Image: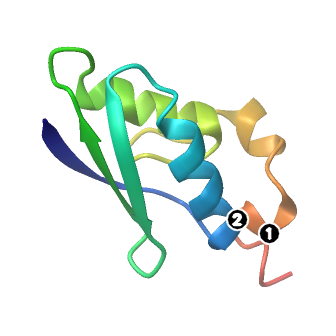
Amino acid sequence: SDTIQIKTSAQCSMCKKKLEHDIVYTKGVKSADLDLKTKQLMVIYNPEKISPDKIRKAVSMIGYDADSIPADPKAYKNLNDCCKKGGHDD
């Protein structure tokens, strides 16, 4: 297995749950752990089944930024308000 760190736009513990839960349904992803302090998602994956770019794309489709890939607008719109960037400051 390989490990990748992806900088996300996660905001809260709900984001953590959602990201960790949803990303493991991606083929080739074994496990994921989000550090809310750094917003870094650590993903353990099988490099024969998935590439880092595909993992970033999967994070984007869940609704979060992934390094330089912005969150999918539709998925982002469907996130709970507390999961959106700036959602806590309004």
Left or right: 43, with 22 as reference point: left
* Residue 6 x %, y %: 33, 52
Residue bearing the label numbered 1: 82
Under mark 1, the amino acid is Cys
Q: Residues within 10 Å of mark 2 (few under 14, many from 20)?
A: some
Q: Is residue 28 above or below residue 9?
A: above
* Res 67 seen here: no
Residue bearing the label numbered 2: 14
Placement of the N terminus among the 4 image quadrants: top left
Q: Residue at x 46, y 57 (%)?
A: 8
* Residue 13 x %, y %: 64, 72
**Cβ–Cβ below 8 Å for labels 1 and 2?**
yes
Q: Residue at x 73, y 63 (%)?
A: 83
* Residue 71 x %, y %: 58, 41
Local SS, label 2: helix
Considering only order in the chain, which callout, 2 or 1, is on the residue closer to the N terminus? Answer: 2
Left or right: 12, with 40 as reference point: right
Name the one closer to the observer, 9 or 17: 17
Distance from disc 1 to disc 2, alpha carbons, whole Å, reads 8 Å
Under mark 2, the amino acid is Met
